[in-house]
Amino acid sequence: MSIPSGASMNIIIRIQLETNIISLGEIVNVIGDEAGDIIGLDVISSSKTSTVRDITVRVHNNNHGQQVVSAISKLAGVKVVNVSDSTFLLHLGGKIEMKPKVRIKNRDDLSRVYTPGVAAISEAIHADPSKVYSLTMKSNTVAIVTDGTAVLGLGDIGPEAAMPVMEGKAMLFKQLANVDAFPICLDTKDTEEIIRIVKSISPTFGGINLEDIASPRCFEIEQRLKSELNIPVFHDDQHGTAVAIYAGLLNALKIVQKNVKDIKVVINGIGAAGIACTKILLAAGAKNVIGVDRNGAIYRGGSYSNPHWQAYAEMTNPENLQGSLSDVIGEADVFIGVSAPGTLKVEDVQKMATDAIVFAMANPVPEIDPDLASPHVRVMATGRSDYPNQINNVLCFPGIFRGALDCRASEINEAMKLAAAEAIASTVSDEELSESYIIPSVFNNKVVDKIRDAVVKAAVETGVARKIPNSNK
Ligand SMILES: NC(=O)C1=CN([C@@H]2O[C@H](COP(=O)(O)OP(=O)(O)OC[C@H]3O[C@@H](n4cnc5c(N)ncnc54)[C@H](O)[C@@H]3O)[C@@H](O)[C@H]2O)C=CC1
Ligand SMILES: CC(=O)C(=O)O
Ligand SMILES: [Mg+2]
C-alpha cells in the first residue's frame, strides 16, 4: 500500500535550459499539463545561451514526481541536472544542534564557564546532589531512548535509521514545550543492557522518553526503569498514544452520543500502543474491548508466544470471540488500529455499527486509506498530519513532560495520564466539536499549557511532585 492520495510532496528539479531552443514558459506549461503545482522558481546561474534553474513542484507522490520529471526530460533544449525531494534536503546535516546559552567572550568568561570557576559548582553539587537540578541542564532535559526496533510502523530498522525520527521528536519537544531533548539511539536489543545503559546515563536527564522499542521487551524495560530510577520514565508509544487516543475518543463519543461503558471496541495490533490503549479504555469504564493481532482475536484458552497476551485475554473479550479481524469486527462501535498498513478492509468497516468511529493510527501508512473508509464511518482519524483529526502522541508528550519537569515529578502516573487526556479533549469546545474536528491541532498553542497545568495538579494531588512550580499563566 502506498502513501494515500491525500498526501503530497515537494520535489526540486534542477534544469539547464538552452534559451535559444526553449523558453521557461514552455516548461511551466508541460509541468501544468502533468498536474504538477509549481510553488517556486529560482535562477541558479545564467549565461547568454543557457540558464540553470531550480523548479519546486508539488506532486501527489513519488510516481507522480517521476511522471513530471520524465515529461520535462523529453523536451528539446532541457537537461535535468538533478531532482531532490525537499524532505531529504531538510534533513541534510541533521535537524537539531546544541547551542550554548552564553557566549564565552574573554578569559574571565572562560574561567567561569570552565575550569577553574566551574569547580566550585561541581563541589556544590557534590555536597548537595539536588543542586544538579538548579545548576545544570538536567531539570529541562529529556533523553529520547530507542533501540530502533519498532520505528513508526517501519519495524526493526536499526538505531541509525531511527535517528531522523528521534531528531524530529527532539524538535517537537523544544518547539512545543521548550524541553531540551536529544536522541540516544542504542546499538543493542538486549533488555538488561538497555536498562543498564539508561540507568548509567540518567544523571544528565530530568526524564526518559522511551521510543519505538518493540514489544514485549518495551514493557519490562519501562517497568524496571520506573522502579529503579527517581526521574519520570515514559514509553511514549504506550502511554502518549493511549492518552491521545482516549482524548480523541472522549470527543468522538460526544458526537455519536454513545457512552464508553456501552461500546464495542476492536483494537488491531496488541503491541506497545495496543496494550496501553486497552488499559486506558478499561480504566475509563469500557467493558467490551477485543484485541486482535496477526493471528486473530486474543481470547481465553488461546496459546500465545507473547507473554502479555494471556493476561490481556483475561481482561478483555468478554464474549471470548475467536477468529480474524473480519470475524470479530461486526457491530463494533470503534476500531482502533495500531498495527500495520492496509490491515482494515472496506468490507470490515461496513460490518461496524452505525455511527462507526475508526482511528487508523499506523504510521506512516494507516490501516485503511481514509478516503476509502470515510464514506462508511461517522468519525475518521489517523496519525497523519495531512488528514483531519490527526491523533498522534505528539499531542501528549511535550505537555506531559513539561508538567512533569516543572513539578520535578518522580514519575508519570495514571492520574497524570488521564488528566492529560482530559486536558487535550477539553481544548475542543462543544461549539467547535464536529466529525472533522475531534482533536486539537498540534499547533494549537493552548494544548501544551492545558496539559502542563493538569499534569502538575494531578502530580501534586497524587504526591509525586517534588516541587510546586509557578503557575504557567
Ligand atoms: N499515531 C500515533 O501516535 C502512534 C502510532 N503508532 C503506530 O502503531 C503501530 C504499532 O506501534 P507499536 O505498538 O509501537 O509497535 P509494536 O511493534 O509494539 O506493536 C505492533 C503490533 O502490531 C501487530 N501487527 C503487525 N502486523 C499486524 C497485522 N497485519 N495485523 C494485526 N496485527 C499486526 C504486531 O504483531 C504487534 O503486536 C505502528 O504503525 C506505529 O506507527 C504507534 C504509536 C503512536
Ligand atoms: C507517532 C509514533 O510515535 C509512532 O508512530 O511510533
Ligand atoms: Mg513512536
Image (cartoon, helix red, strand yellow):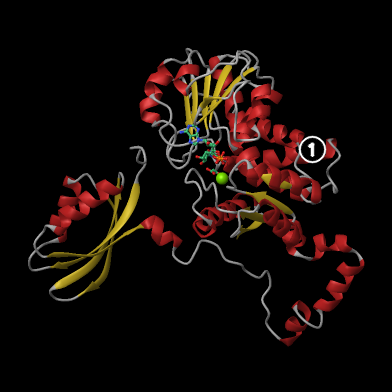
Q: Position of residue 85 (x, y in %)?
A: 34, 57
Depicted 196 relative to depicted 349: above or below: below
63 left or right of 398 in image: left
Q: Does the rendering let one see residue 224?
A: yes
Q: Position of residue 244 (x, y in %)?
A: 60, 35
Q: In which quadrant is the N terminus drawn?
A: top left
Farthest residue, direction bottom: 107
Where ligand 3 lies, by image quadrant? top right
Depicted 265 relative to depicted 4: above or below: above
Q: How many numbered badges does the structure rendering display?
A: 1
The quarter of the picture where residue 443 lies is top right
Which residue corresponds to mark 1?
457
Q: Which residue is nearer to you in this view: 219 or 241?
A: 219
Q: Secondary structure at mark 1?
A: helix
Q: Position of residue 21 (x, y in %)?
A: 7, 65
Q: Position of residue 235 (x, y in %)?
A: 66, 44
Name the amino acid type tagged 1. Answer: Lys
Q: Residue at x 12, y 68 (%)?
A: 19
299 left or right of 347 in image: right
The quarter of the picture where residue 459 lies is top right
